[in-house]
């Protein structure tokens, strides 16, 4: 092979890097907007577990969480033609999810928050029985501690932990001021730490 021909070939390292690159969420949503169903499948795969945990830990009702989960994804699908990547897709997704939950609370005056379902009940098969037991106990302590938080603090904490959103993004999702959001997250973390410590000290 001539030097000229060899120089025209792509660098193998560049090819490996290109193959490892994945489109970000906003790019996938834009592709879905243009009719690419596989792009939506990838978005769903990336976010379905965290979104379901958000709803379940927010309200504690498995049936309601399932309904809200389906409603949020349905709204994302129906609104795809109007989607604009003005913020991270996760911010957009959880703004829709948060509004779905607020509407649910308004529709159900008998709603009572309380965490009584473990969203991670299926332990990893690779874990030993002892590790599975410890993981289950830790999760149950967390669910019990979450149930003690006021709704607004629980929502902010879950948006931070489950969705991975920052303070400004959470403020946008919840339509709150930045300082109020920051305070809610700080109080939530403090109360959870206290509750978890108390539960560990209880015989």
Image (tube, rainbow, N blue to C red):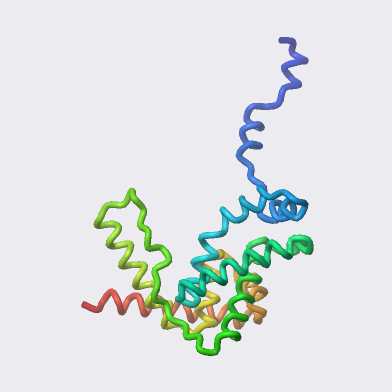
Horizontal and vertical percent position of residue 177: 66, 81
Q: Residue at x 60, y 86 (%)?
A: 106
Does residue 156 lie above or below 132 as drawn? below
Most extreme residue toward the left is 203
Horizontal and vertical percent position of residue 197: 32, 76
Q: Residue at x 57, y 78 (%)?
A: 182
User: Which quarter shows the N terminus?
Assistant: top right
Q: Residue at x 62, y 51 (%)?
A: 41
User: Which quarter shows the C terminus?
Assistant: bottom left
- Quick check: 138 left or right of 55? left
Does residue 5 lie above or below 175 as drawn? above
Horizontal and vertical percent position of residue 3: 74, 13
- Quick check: 73 left or right of 189? right
**Total tally of numbered discs in the picture:** 0
Using the rendered view, name the quadrant where residue 81 is placed.
Answer: bottom right
Does residue 107 lie above or below 79 as drawn? below
Horizontal and vertical percent position of residue 91: 65, 66
Using the rendered view, name the quadrant where residue 77 is placed.
Answer: bottom right
- Quick check: 94 left or right of 58? right
Residue nearer the viewer, 2 or 29: 29
Q: Residue at x 25, y 55 (%)?
A: 129
Most extreme residue toward the bottom is 109
């Amino acid at each position: 092979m001539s030097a000229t021909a060899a120089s025209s070939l792509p660098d193998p390292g560049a090819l490996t890097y290109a193959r490892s690159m994945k489109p970000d969420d906003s790019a996938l949503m834009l592709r879905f907007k243009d009719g690419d169903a596989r792009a939506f499948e990838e978005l769903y795969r990336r976010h379905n577990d965290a979104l379901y945990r958000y709803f379940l830990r927010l309200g504690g009702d498995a049936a309601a969480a399932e309904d809200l989960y389906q409603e949020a994804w349905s709204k994302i699908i129906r609104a795809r033609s109007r989607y604009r990547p003005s913020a991270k897709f996760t911010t957009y997704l959880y703004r829709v999810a948060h509004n779905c939950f607020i509407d649910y609370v308004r529709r159900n005056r008998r709603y009572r928050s309380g965490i009584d379902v473990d969203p991670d009940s299926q332990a990893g098969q690779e874990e030993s029985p002892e590790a599975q037991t410890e993981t289950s106990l830790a999760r149950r302590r967390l669910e019990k501690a979450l149930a003690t938080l006021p709704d607004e603090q629980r929502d902010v904490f879950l948006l931070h932990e489950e969705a991975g959103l920052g303070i400004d993004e959470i403020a946008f999702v919840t339509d709150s001021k930045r300082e109020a959001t920051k305070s809610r997250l700080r109080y939530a973390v403090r109360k959870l730490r206290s509750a978890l410590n108390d539960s560990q000290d209880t015989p």
